[in-house]
């Protein structure tokens, strides 16, 4: 994992291999969904490496020992609907006790501006480490707005995880929220005239849910 200025790029070969599978137009819904979840788990493994530990006493079959377990702040996963839902299972596989919030946003097809239609976050949000998940960071409008909502509700310790980012979206999210950690599977070339990521993988929500 390469990190600079709170942005961490995943260069692990397993993640890169699976992203290539996602890009392929011939990858069907079932395989696509599975791949999104696996990538989320592999990225989560890296993104959660700073979770605090505390020593606890455990009795092994041989003797009693003091050994570390995850401590401190509780975790919340917050997918941006719809496509972020595909990544939730990957994080829950790592931390099954995490709570799940939801932020519903859709991009207006003409203006590409994000519109909110739902927001429900687990309390007390200010005491949790929050991992916002969305496979795509295109203009960065949806990601920035989702982090705005979480901050307005009191969220403080925020990580943003996306599988593919455009440089424009990354710049926008960093500019609006310089205090959060951003984890990216791959940074692509840029956006086309419809604000789709190139080469990208198409419409992540439609490919996960088999719509359109
Ligand atoms: C997609 C994607 C992001 C957003 C990224 O969602 O999952 O949320 O677009 O674009 P942006 O960075 O330019 O805001 P979309 O609005 O297509 O909704 P969906 O997940 O319901 O399909
Ligand atoms: N949303 C997607 O699903 N794909 C893109 O390329 C851009 C926004």
Image (spheres, grey):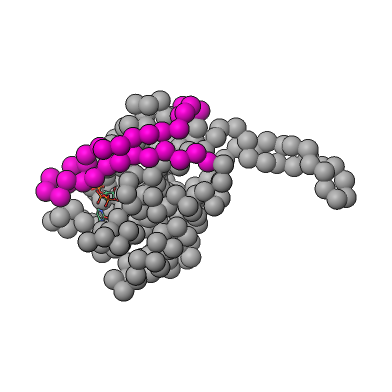
Q: Residue furthest right?
A: 62
Q: Position of residue 104 (x, y in %)?
A: 30, 41
Which residue is depicted at the point 42% across and 38% down?
101
Residue 189 visible in image? no
Left or right: where 207 falls relative to 70: left
Q: In this picture, is 149 found above or below 195?
A: above
Which residue is depicted at the point 32% across and 58% down?
209
Q: In this picture, is 85 found above or below 19?
A: above
**Foreground residue among 208 and 160:** 208
**Foreground residue among 30 and 142:** 30
* Magenta span: 98-127
Q: Position of residue 114 (x, y in %)?
A: 22, 41
Quadrant of the frame with the C terminus? bottom left
Residue 26 visible in image? yes
Q: In this picture, is 166 found above or below 78?
A: below
Task: Say whether residue 204 is magenta.
Answer: no
Q: Position of residue 162 (x, y in %)?
A: 37, 51
Task: Say whether residue 125 is magenta.
Answer: yes
Left or right: where 74 falls relative to 183: right
Q: Quadrant of residue 178?
A: top left
Q: How many marks?
A: 0
**Foreground residue among 82 and 142:** 82
Q: Position of residue 40 (x, y in %)?
A: 45, 54
Q: Quadrant of residue 10?
A: bottom left
Which residue is depicted at the point 41% across and 33% down?
121
Which residue is depicted at the point 40% across and 54% down?
86
């Amino acid at each position: 994992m390469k990190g600079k200025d709170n942005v961490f790029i995943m260069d692990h070969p397993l993640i890169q291999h699976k992203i290539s599978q996602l890009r392929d137009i011939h990858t069907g819904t079932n395989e696509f969904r599975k791949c999104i979840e696996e990538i989320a788990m592999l990225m989560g493994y890296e993104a959660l490496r700073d979770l605090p530990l505390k020593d606890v006493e455990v009795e092994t079959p041989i003797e009693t020992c003091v050994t570390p377990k995850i401590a401190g702040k509780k975790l919340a996963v917050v997918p941006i609907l719809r496509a972020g839902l595909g990544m939730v299972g990957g994080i829950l596989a790592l931390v099954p006790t995490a709570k799940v919030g939801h932020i519903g946003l859709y991009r207006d097809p003409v203006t590409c501006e994000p519109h909110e239609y739902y927001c429900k976050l687990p309390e007390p949000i200010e005491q949790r480490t929050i991992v916002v998940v969305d496979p795509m960071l295109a203009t960065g409008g949806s990601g920035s707005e989702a982090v705005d909502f979480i901050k307005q509700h009191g969220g403080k310790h925020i990580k943003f995880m996306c599988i593919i980012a455009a440089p424009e979206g990354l710049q926008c999210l960093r500019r609006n929220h310089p205090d959060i950690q951003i984890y990216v599977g791959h940074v692509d070339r840029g956006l086309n005239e419809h604000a789709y990521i190139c080469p990208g993988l198409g419409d992540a929500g439609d490919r996960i849910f088999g719509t359109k």
